[in-house]
Image (cartoon, rainbow, N blue to C red):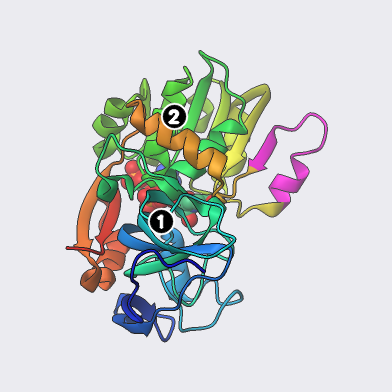
Amino acid sequence: MTMENQMPTSMRAAQADAFGDPPVLKVRDVPLRPPRSDRAVVRMLATTVNPLDLEARRGELRALRRPPIGTGLDVAGHIVAAGKRWKGPPVGTPVWGALGGLPVKKLMAAAEYVEVRSGWVVEAPTRIPLTEAAALPVAALTAHLGLRSLRLRPGARVLIRGASGGVGTAAIQIARHLGAHVIALCSPRNNDLCLSLGAQETVDYHSLDWNSLAPVDAAFDIVGGDDLKRLTQVVQNGGRVSAAVPDRPGLIVASVLPGRTSIRPVLALPSRRHLNDLASLIDLGHLAPVVAQRFPLAQIAEAHHHLETDPTPGKRIIDIVT
Ligand SMILES: NC(=O)c1ccc[n+]([C@@H]2O[C@H](COP(=O)([O-])OP(=O)(O)OC[C@H]3O[C@@H](n4cnc5c(N)ncnc54)[C@H](OP(=O)(O)O)[C@@H]3O)[C@@H](O)[C@H]2O)c1
């Protein structure tokens, strides 16, 4: 193993010893080990809170891992140590990406250091500060993969359900960059945000009459639930729906039958190729984060509470270095 920079033997990290409300999250000293031979260690600058972090903390993913569990999927920082077989960016590189594998581990990215595999991080975009770019990897990967599976053509009318959220605000920008006509389903208080990001139309989902919606070429669902079926009904023949919350497996399986609108589940697994695509979009000015609020690592529990209870759109960024 090469260790070109010094690493301490312990670090501060957020961990929960039990499932429950945000106060189960504590920031504590934990041992820091050198990276395994095919991995590297990132000195973290910032991460975010994603809805999956809330689900893990509440115990909704308990089948995957029992406490203690870490929190935080988005990675933004600098490589400070690398194993002998590491194939990613060299020590010293500012990197950006997301933790892959099981979405819940003992230690995650809300920590001073995190161990990564090579496909999980790429050289960070430079157009915006890395501490802001930290808001994008998971959300933008989900948006990118969800839109790719729709095979949008320029001018295609695409409906985005959940458009004002972390994934949705990235999806609006990427869909516009692809030349699509974007119709954003959101709360009226978020109309201006969605329009400012590039949506051509907004629709209030609270008072929506699905039968009055004009047919669309494709739809990206980022909410889940029973309305997934409604989405398939507003998509024209031959069009597709992608689903970031594939909680209706029966509907998805049945969508392969002839004559049905195909529903493609989305899983935001990080890969070098897709992270590089997204870093380029950021550097070309086509994709920027929407930030609701920043919290220091010590306030990780408050950040979870904020995402759970406050409807302000945008990401909650956790600053590791303050
Ligand atoms: N498959 C994957 O790999 C993957 C990856 C990332 C996220 N996800 C999932 O995607 C979902 C969204 O994530 P996020 O980070 O975007 O969450 P978020 O930032 O919390 O945003 C949630 C958004 O959902 C909107 N919403 C709620 N109910 C709605 C409805 N009935 N119709 C339309 N919009 C509605 C809200 O819009 P208003 O405030 O405008 O009402 C809010 O902006 C989560 O369930 C998350 O777990 C999946």
Residue closer to the observer: 81 or 130: 81
Label 1 beta carbon within 8 A of ligand 1: no
**Taking 10 as reference, is 152 above or below it?**
above
Q: Earlier in the sequence, mark 1 or mark 2?
A: 1
Report the label total. 2
Q: Distance between the residues labelled 1 and 2?
A: 31 Å
Q: Would you call the spot at circle 2 few (<14 residues within 10 Å), some (14-19), or many (20 or more)?
A: many
Secondary structure of the residue carrying tag 1 is loop
**Taking 137 as reference, is 105 above or below it?**
below
Examine the structure image and report whether residue 203 is included in the region drawn in magenta.
Answer: no
Instruction: Say which amino acid is labelled 2.
Output: Ile
> Outermost residue, bottom direction?
17
Label 2 beta carbon within 8 A of ligand 1: no
**Taking 37 as reference, is 276 above or below it?**
above
Find disc 1 in the rendering and name its residue: 91
x%, y% of residue 54? 41, 66
Residue at horizontal 61%, vertical 51%? Answer: 246
Residue 172 seen in the figure: no
- Which residues fall within the magenta stretch? 250-264
Instruction: Say which amino acid is labelled 1.
Output: Val
Decide if residue 140 is on the left or right side of residue 198: right
Secondary structure of the residue carrying tag 2 is helix
Residue at horizontal 37%, vertical 37%? Answer: 169
x%, y% of residue 134? 33, 50
Tell me which corner region of the image, top left, top right, bottom left or bottom right, holds residue 51. bottom left
Find disc 2 in the rendering and name its residue: 174
Which of the numbered marks, if any, corresponds to residue 47?
Answer: none
Foreground mark, 1 or 2, reads 1
